[in-house]
Structure formats: structure tokens, C-alpha cells
Amino acid sequence: MEKAALILNQDKKEAFAIAKRAIKWFEKRDKDYLVEESVSLQLDREAKKADYEKIINEADYVIIIGGDGTFLHSSHHFIGSDLPLLGINVGHLGFLTDVETDEVEKALEMISNGNFQIEKRMMIKSKLIRSGKILSSSYALNDYVINRSPDSHMLQIKLYINNELVNKYRGDGLIIATPTGSTAYSLSAGGPIINPRQVRAILITPICPHNLHLRPMVISDLEEIRIRIDSDGKNIKGCADGRYNDEIIPGDEIFISAADKELCILKLPDRTFYTTIKEKMDLA
């Protein structure tokens, strides 16, 4: 793990300051590194610029500097590549970017000494089908979300698992999340926290259901979900990790299952999942 690649959120000044600290650490120790091409000029390191293909081919690991949104956006370039990603948090909560800004040099030292772990995180894959044809497909590390616009009627949703009708209800939408995504939107909607380092599962969390008995469900990663939208509503969206938008109309079906590809995340051994939960939720 000698050669790193730097990717950062260009809208955050602090991200550039952290990147410069990392570069200083690399150069002081005569370690090679790459800088994602869109920020190489601002960092005055055009000689080190690299596109995502070069990063995948030449880097040993990737450092993503920003918030969880930056991590999610950047991570989609590395799905199935086996290239581990390290997130440095200059955002808010930072469940994916769990290395804090004052720990950068310590983290780089630990990685250089081989003191790290690589976790393979499961992802989900969605397919939007209309009249028997696949209109789109996408991967998600966190979640696939179906919701309505504020001026739309309440959605009428049928939920099938393994082709068996499990529930039929009205509400604002549905979140299908991975264990990694259990601490994201699903958590805000009342879903449970699942340890992504130990559990492979799929989480189904309704958004404001108009059924008092309806609760989140956790199912096996070997099962397939089918969602049918029977609403007369308009402006219905399906979104994978907040970046791939599907326009959904009544009669559409969305199939979701565990993906055939994973994402590698680099973790330091001094931080367990429960340590992160305690710190990020201010329980200490």
C-alpha cells in the first residue's frame, strides 16, 4: 500500500488543506502518489494528475477527502475494482469518511506500516422495468430510494419478496438499503442500524407509511425485492445513492437484489463500527 491517489471535494477549502498535508507527508517520505485530474491544477501538482482509469491501474489505495456525499459520488468509479478507499471527513456526520482531519498523518503512518484492514461492502443493484423492458439499472452502496414530490398524491406501493406479495400500502415512498446505508436516510426514517462489517442483509424502510402497523424489515441478501407503483401520482423518482435518478410512472416495477459486485473500504484497526456509532451520534 505504497501509492495513494487523492480525490477531494472541490467546494470545500478544508479539503484542499488536508490534501496538501497528505502531499507533504508523501513527499517527505519519498512516496509516490496521484492526484485526481480535476484538482491537480489547484494543488499545483499537474505532474501527478490522473484520470479514474489511471488511478485504478496504478494506485494501491484511494484517499477521498470530503463528506459522505463526496465518498458516495467518488466510490461509484471503483465498484468491483478491489481498490480500497479511505474516507477523510470534512463533512458532518461522516459514517463513510470516519477518519477525522486531525488524524490524517496518523492514518497515513498506519497504512504505511501495514496496520489496516480492508472490508468488502455489499451493494445492491436495481432495475427499472416498464412494459417488460429494462429502462435503467444502477448500483448503490447506501440505498435506492423511491419517493414522491410534495405536490404529488400519496404513493400506492405493492411490495413483493421472491415474487410473493408481502405488503400493499400508501405512503411517501420506500428506502431499500444495504447495511452500510442503514446509518443514512433509512435511519432518519426509523430504520434499524446494521453492522456492515458483520452482516449481509437488505433493509426495507417505508417513508411515512399511512399504515400504523407497517415497520421496517430486514431480509436476507439472497432474496429479491420487487416493487410495483400503482399510484396516479406524478413526479415519482427512484434514486440510487443520491445520484442516479429514475423517472417512475404508475405501473412501473423496480427489482432490487444484492449486487454481484462489492466495494472495498480501508479501515484502521483502532476504530470499530460501534466506536464510530458512539462518536458520530454523540453518545460518548
Image (spheres, grey):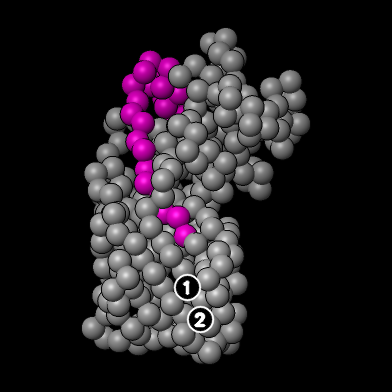
Front one among 172 and 100:
172
Magenta range is 100-126
The three-letter code of the residue at mark 1 reads: Glu
Q: Is residue 111 magenta?
A: yes
Q: Quadrant of the N terminus?
A: top left
- Taking the image as drawn, is residue 234 in sight? yes
Q: Is residue 257 left or right of residue 48?
A: left
Q: Quadrant of residue 219?
A: bottom left
- The reply to whether callout 1 and callout 2 are in contact (CB within 8 Å) is yes
Disc marking residue 251: 2
Q: Quadrant of residue 26?
A: top right
- Taking the image as drawn, is residue 282 in sight? no
Q: Which residue is mark 1?
A: 253
Please rate how many residues cluster around mark 2, counting C-alpha atoms within 10 Å: few if below 14, some from 14 to 19, many from 20. some
Q: Is residue 223 left or right of residue 145?
A: left
Front one among 10 and 260:
260
Please rate how many residues cluster around mark 1, counting C-alpha atoms within 10 Å: few if below 14, some from 14 to 19, many from 20. many
Q: Is residue 228 magenta?
A: no
Q: Secondary structure at mark 1?
A: strand
Q: Is residue 153 left or right of residue 220?
A: right
Which residue sits at x=60%, y=72%? Answer: 247
